[in-house]
Image (tube, grey):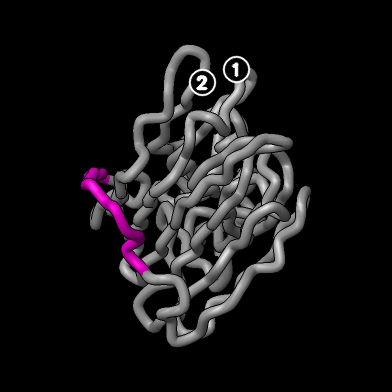
Amino acid sequence: VSPCDVEETNCTDSGDNDGDLHTDCDDSDCAADPLCQPYAGVYEVFEIDPEYFDLTERTVTLTPDTVNPLTYTTTSTTSTVFPVNVGSGTISGVIPLSNYDNEEHVFSEMSDFTFFGITYSSVFLSSEGYLSFGSGSSGLVDSGTELHNRPTICGLCESMDSGDGTVYFDESVNSVAFTYIGVTFDAEIPGNDWQVVLHDDGRIDITWLSVPFEGFDSADTLVVGIGNGVG
């Protein structure tokens, strides 16, 4: 079989699977693989001095495009309660996050979750306010560049003291919610309340109920939104 008759079979193994002297994303066979796409994201960076966070009591829903997995549409609605009540899942509990920590949550009721066209069976929660896929981290994300270090959902990304609050999970067959209650910015008070809901159809809801101005200082840079971790 000549190289023209076969295709690259794995776009992430650092190997030349089809013998055409092109490896992984350098092979045209991998052009459509999500991991070989340019970086993509939907996010906002808040420079706290002088800009104030303006998403309190809002839910932003991000819906993946059915044709292009790198594209999400967004809607924003007023919310005075979380979409998913704490303790309402088929399985509910607490994620034991301490400062500078990350914990993996393996989906058990919901079968999997697709993010930027890639399907995952688990998600990693970081003490720094974000969810990531494929690997976990406790590194700081406070810029658009850092958002793309790995596939990431920023609920409220900055230097956080997750040990000061509580992170809950509520999982059902159709969704899993992660709710942060009383989580403070590093060495600051009062705490912040927000929730990220992952739906089995790929939709993401991010809700911010309480992000008090008193919890900010001029050095804080907040990032909220999503990034595919490629670029």
Q: Is residue 70 left or right of residue 170?
A: left
Residue 26 visible somewhere in the drawing: no
User: What residue would you read off at disc 1?
Assistant: 218
Q: Nearer the viewer, residue 4 or 79?
A: 79
Q: Is residue 157 left or right of residue 197?
A: right
Q: Amino acid at mark 2?
A: Ile
Query: What is the number of callouts on the image?
Result: 2
Residue 231 visible somewhere in the drawing: yes
Residue at the spot 49% in from the left edge and 47% down from the top edge: 155
Residue 121 quadrant: bottom right
User: What residue would you read off at disc 2?
Assistant: 48
Residue at the spot 48% in from the left edge and 36% down from the top edge: 212
- Disc 1 crowd, CA 10 A, few/some/many (<14, 14-19, 20+): few
Instruction: Note whether 47 is above or below 123 in the view shown.
Output: above
Quarter of the image that includes the C terminus: top right
Q: Is residue 127 left or right of residue 111?
A: right
Q: Earlier in the sequence, mark 1 or mark 2?
A: 2
Q: Which residues are magenta?
A: 73-84
- Disc 2 crowd, CA 10 A, few/some/many (<14, 14-19, 20+): some
Please identify the residue farthest to the top as the structure is shown.
50
Residue 177 quadrant: bottom left
For label 1, the SS is: loop
Residue at the spot 53% in from the left edge and 84% down from the top edge: 108
> Residue 203 in magenta?
no
Report if the CB atoms under discs 1 and 2 are less than 8 Å apart: yes
Residue at the spot 62% in from the left edge and 72% down from the top edge: 94
For label 2, the SS is: loop
